[in-house]
Image (cartoon, coloured by chain):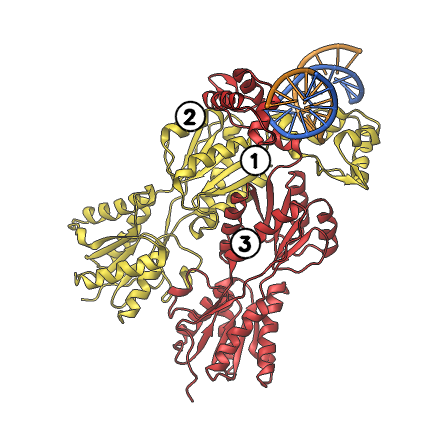
Chain colours: A yellow, B red, C orange, D blue
Amino acid sequence: MQRPTRYGDEVVTLDRVAREAGVSPSTVSRILNGTARVSEAKRDAVEQAIRRLNYQPNAVARGLASGRTLSIGVLAPDIASPLYADALRAIEQSLADQGYWPLFVSRQGDDRHEYAQLCQLASRQVDGVILLAGQVEDERLRDYALRTPICLIGRQLQAPNVQSVVADISAGASMAVQHLLDLGHRRIAYIGPAGDSPEAQACLHGYQQTLRQAGLEFDRRLVLGAEGQGAGGMLAMQRLLDSRLDFSAVFAGDDQLALGAQLALRRRNLRIPDEMSLVGFGDLPVAPYTTPPLTTVRLPGHELGSLAAKAIVRLIDGETPRLEVPPLQLVIRESTRRLRR
Amino acid sequence: MQRPTRYGDEVVTLDRVAREAGVSPSTVSRILNGTARVSEAKRDAVEQAIRRLNYQPNAVARGLASGRTLSIGVLAPDIASPLYADALRAIEQSLADQGYWPLFVSRQGDDRHEYAQLCQLASRQVDGVILLAGQVEDERLRDYALRTPICLIGRQLQAPNVQSVVADISAGASMAVQHLLDLGHRRIAYIGPAGDSPEAQACLHGYQQTLRQAGLEFDRRLVLGAEGQGAGGMLAMQRLLDSRLDFSAVFAGDDQLALGAQLALRRRNLRIPDEMSLVGFGDLPVAPYTTPPLTTVRLPGHELGSLAAKAIVRLIDGETPRLEVPPLQLVIRESTRRLRR
DNA sequence: GTGAAAGCGCTAACAA
DNA sequence: TTGTTAGCGCTTTCAC
């Protein structure tokens, strides 16, 4: 069984094109790949034949013969996660510009399968892998990288054939908290993503450190983990309010959590930013349109993605690029204001 | 150049496994694919060898030899669009369950390249294609399907080797408008996605038809197209308000537009739902957390995706499944209320 | 049941 | 510059 390109009823292969043009298959291959100089006459004949037969090279055969598939595995937590949307888009675009294809795979919440998925990608003969965050053990990654270069996004790892593209989450969190401090807030609660993902840890760390540097004591009761996006943020906010602790601002480690918190506050008739300041993290597309528009920290997803795409291709070419990761940015909208006393 | 699996320094191929197990390559292949009965003894030997050498089949070689790559091209308007997120997730999951792989490609706004991308997928030897919406001409699709089965999501096309999975957008829009009618609203504005995509047309059609059936005259001035998501919705809402036309409710053909409209209303100090009712379309994850939580129409993205994934595999197997597409659902939250007069 | 042999469509030495 | 030849790693007849 086979399903290649056809011309009428006939299968159009490179050999068929060669025959049609009256040249050898290698000549056709050379023209297709620009591997060597070919005379004008033959080039014309071949190009005509290609057009006449509507020939399309078989990427699979090419991959087998050359050992390069020109495809890059992209393993992300969620193919459709809003946080990574920009990064994924940029990866696709940038890879295309460089002649590569992404093979997107999402973990779909099942972190244990992650290594298995990497192996699947290997069996698909990807030339490289871009891994977003991820829980695979360092040792396994090191080993994997011996055969296939890896570019990590959001995770640091020093190893041959491995590059890391890491935004400074902690610094971003710090900007958010510093912004609140600058507005006079002293009691700042934190609602962060549950779990101990690197992002979650970095975010919490930025929060704590910034408070400490401001000479403020760190109140553990003001720190809550939340799972389940909007719902989690809502729940955490409710608990915070129920605790009757004193606080005038909330930093949410994720815009979705912030949205949930927003709703919880509204349900209690607490106005943002008049009675409570709120900062998110991520700058989702909806952030400018929440009520009120959400002050948040912009993750340079697009830049991270295209950086990673370029890095992986460099790695494949045997180079070891130095990467300049762009900083996060505070986007001040309307959910924060100066503390009135 | 080659990058297969290795054992120590040595390349691990099927042949290598065969040698290790003391059988012929064909036997190994048979075991791997379950193509024929093999004696217990040999099966054990082979399985041990596979484990010992850590062998992983080369999917590319397999694809070339068998003519089937077990991969399905998935062409979507945007790999990371929130509207299609559920569908894409479901496609990935459902294809995996059936032993197939998705090759996600997004149009990235460039509709002219769409056919070229289909050709790229063909050159990658995908066994089938799932196409979300899309502008390719029917004739080209028909032709393409002669070689590679296609499953269309959100687009109707009768042709051999083609299946369509179409949610009744028009009916969904109708539910939204009917809901507003039921609440006593008579002057209902419409902010829809600009352009003449099938979805946009269907949505507008549902709106018009429902009004007409209610015996209401259709006021063209209350219908606005909006581009650019939130910003577009905001702009359209502003224009609507500036027009000083009389209306008490707005139906937005897209949740993102609704969010923009929400903000515009808030800027004018018009309270939702007290002074203006608002219905969205799509039920994005943020919809339950907007201010107020958005009444909207849920698109059964997950169901559409898994339906399509199953349909395409059936098509590949030469069947022609009959598809039961689930209906859209109105999700009533807090952005609509009875008109007070 | 099992093995030998012939390819899948292409690339890449190696000659010429 | 061009053609010939030998694979890439696997599946699949076809014999046995």
What is the chain identity of the residue bearing mark 1?
Answer: A
Q: Nearer the viewer, mark 1 or mark 3?
A: 3
In the rendered image, which residue does mark 1 sit on?
Answer: A71
Reading the image, the residue beneath label 3 is: B305
Q: Does the residue at mark 2 contact the one at mark 1 (Cβ under 8 Å)?
A: no
Is A257 left or right of A324, judged from the image as shown? left
Residue closest to the eye, A145 or D9: D9
Q: CA distance from mark 1 to mark 3?
A: 25 Å
Between A294 and C8, the residue placed more toward the observer is C8
Task: Characterize the local packing of mark 2: few (<14), some (14-19) or many (20 or more) Cα atoms within 10 angstroms.
Answer: few
Label 1 SS: strand
Camera-side mark, 2 or 3: 3
User: Callout 1: 10 Å neighbours few (<14), some, many (20+)?
Assistant: many
Q: Secondary structure at mark 2?
A: helix
Specify whether residue A31 is in view: yes
Name the residue carrying label 2: A143
